[in-house]
Amino acid sequence: MLSQLIQNTSDSVRTATPEEEERLCPVIDFGPLLANEPGAREKIVEQLRLACESTGFFQILNHPIGKDVIKNAFRASKHFFELPFDEKLMLSKDMFSNRGYELLKDFVLEGEEDSSLDGVVLDDDLSFPGSSSFTPSSLGCPIPSAQSLSTYAEPPDSSPTTWNTGLGDSTPSTSNNAALHDSECMSNEFRESFYFGNDNLSKERLLRPFQGPNKWPSNTGANFRTSLVQYHDEMAAFANQVMCLLAESLGLAPNAFDEFCSDPTTAIRLLRYPSSYNRTGVNDHTDADALTLMAQDEVRGLQIVDPVSQSFVAVSARPSALVANLGDIMAILTNNRYKSSVHRVCNTSGHDRYTIPFFLQGNIDYVVAPLPGLGPSTTEPIAVEDLLRDHFHNSYTSHTTTTSLVC
Ligand SMILES: O=C(O)CCC(=O)C(=O)O
Ligand SMILES: [Fe+2]
């Protein structure tokens, strides 16, 4: 469902004016609703409808997630990314379960440094602690003859790399995880991330794709896991409430998404984006899920495609708000009345950027098709499991890599 967006990668990206931001990613204040003020629900439902029909992006101010819960989650995230590189690599993402660590894939192999790197300033802040003697090939992420690695802030030249940003064309299964992981390891996105989800899954669910078990680091202290699990659980509960409001905004009963939301597959992604002037942190994509809710720090970086100009526009970062956006599943459920917009991340701030999106992917067996009353489907119904699998295969291979982008 990724639009055929073509943007010259050498174009610089405009920052949204306040008016544009109101149109592309409006702020919706949930305070009056949480305070049970009369008329608040109707007002929010209407604001949601307008935002979802436009870009599917909005910012939720005065949401119910505790400040401490968010603070602790960011603390845990920083703690995680500061772990020695080999420790993180031990937790390499398993493509079947979609859980674990995705490395920052920008590195210089010792002894293989290209002469084109001459004059490139290596940023010490970007080097991985403890990375001097790891052996990636033993961890399902082979990098030929690599003895050590460090990251660099800018690429040696502006030509696109030939690294594959996708997941290959095999189907995720426990038997081909290694092959999938290899190609995933060659992505050019300038970020590192760590995926986890519901920490309390049933045995039956643990055997299903895209949901677990979580791959927790050891030696991070008792609070680490508790903080992240609490963040997940509060986000999951709030996402359910937002889904009820979205149902109402479509003129449906508040419980219209209940079946989709029962025993849902969810994911949290801790993200760290080092700063770069010409590398994207996350390439242009749409989310696969129904609803994404994201806490972010004060460092801006998110860019959304403006449906009017069909170009990327950078939006501001408001740490007190949650950024919400709809994904492909919601677009199908609503027969494309609600939008799943292309977005990407570019961090040119000179500082690391941290975000923590929560993805509501829904019941893995739910068959996604327009909800009753929202018109006949133009596409074949598809199970959440298949849709997620297709998305993971396609979304990062079907568009231009943006290594020469001027952010
Ligand atoms: O970090 C961000 O601002 C957005 C991340 C994102 O789009 C994603 O993980 O799907
Ligand atoms: Fe996204």
Image (cartoon, helix red, strand yellow):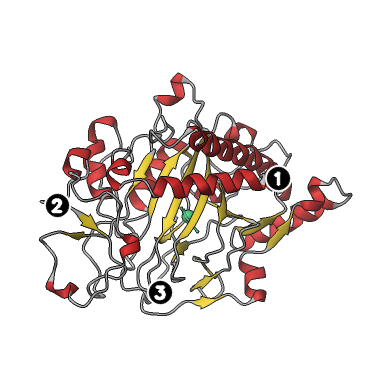
Q: Is residue 155 above or below residue 51?
A: below
> Which of label 2 and label 3 is nearer to you?
2
Q: Position of residue 28 (x, y in %)?
A: 71, 58
Residue situated in front as seen by the camera: 340 or 237: 237
The answer to which of marks 2 and 3 sits earlier in the sequence is 3
Q: Residue at (48%, 61%) from the top-left corner? A: 342
Tell me the distance, in whole angstroms, between the alpha carbons under discs 2 and 3: 35 Å
Query: Which kind of residue does numbered mark 2 sit on?
Result: Ala
Where is residue 312 shown, x and y percent of the image?
49, 71
Q: Does 135 sit left or right of 347 as displayed?
A: left
- Residue 14, percent from left and from top: 51, 78
Q: CA distance from mark 1 to mark 2?
A: 47 Å
Cα gap from disc 1 to disc 3, whole angstroms: 38 Å
Furthest residue in direction right, as rendered:
38
Question: x and y percent of residue 266 in the render?
Answer: 51, 38
Crowding at dot 3, Cα within 10 Å, few <14 / some 14-19 / many 20+, comes out as few
Quadrant housing residue 318: bottom right
Q: Secondary structure at mark 3?
A: loop
**Residue drawn 59% across and 48% down?**
71
Q: Amino acid at mark 1?
A: Pro
Q: Secondary structure at mark 1?
A: loop
Q: Is mark 2 within 8 Å of ligand 1?
A: no
Disc 2 crowd, CA 10 A, few/some/many (<14, 14-19, 20+): some
Residue position marked by numbered label 2 in the rendering = 146
- Determine which of the numbered discs, if any, sits on residue 64 in the image: 1
Q: Earlier in the sequence, mark 1 or mark 2?
A: 1
Image point (49%, 66%), residue name: 301
For the image, the number of numbered tags is 3
Element under label 2?
A: loop
Q: Dot 3 corresponds to which residue?
A: 7
- Comparing 304 with 253, the one in front is 304
Mark 1–mark 3 contact, CB under 8 Å? Answer: no
